[in-house]
Amino acid sequence: MADRRTIFIGKKPLHAYIRAVVMAMEAGDRSLNIVARGATIGRAVDVAEICRRRNGVIAQGLPSEIIIGNIDCSSEEIESDEGNKRIVSVLSIQLDGIGELPVSDSAEE
């Protein structure tokens, strides 16, 4: 099985990550991992659900069906600059795009 492209979720606006999913799928990567740590886990779930439902103008560029695959919940120990260690939760969501991408108006000309 080929490696999945990984999109790390941070603190940018939600639409930036949805656009990253669309761009990855347009580039041919139909199997993606969305990975988030700590406070950004909720944003990762929102990205996966918006893509699955193909909600909004940006998500309309996705394949006809998006399937949410395995969801992995784990934790990592992270060391700060001061040498302190803390444990943060990590969520990984697999997305698979099935079907053809919609044809844009500019591609028809």
Image (cartoon, rainbow, N blue to C red):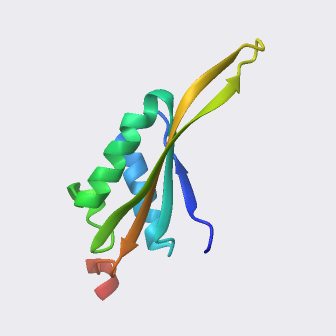
The answer to whether residue 109 of the structure is visible from this angle is no
Screen quadrant of the C terminus = bottom left
Residue 17 appears at what percent x and percent y?
42, 49
Foreground pick, 3 / 100: 3
Let me know if residue 30 appears in the view.
yes
**Would you say 14 lies left or right of 92 here?**
left
Q: Is residue 60 left or right of residue 11?
A: left
Quarter of the figure that contains the N terminus: bottom right
The vertical placement of 78 against 58, above or below, is: above
Q: Quadrant of residue 25?
A: bottom left
Give the mark count.
0
Q: Residue at x 50, y 40 (%)?
A: 36
From this view, report whether residue 16 is shown above or below residue 42.
below
Residue 56: image x %, image y %? 21, 55
Q: Position of residue 81 (x, y in %)?
A: 75, 17
Where 89 falls versus 16 (above or below)? Answer: above
- The structure residue drawn at horizontal position 40% and vertical position 55%, both measured from the top left corner, is 19
89 on left or right of 3: left
**Which residue extends farthest bottom?**
109
**Residue that appears at 55% across and 38% down:** 74
Residue at horizontal 49 percent and vertical 29 percent from the top:
38
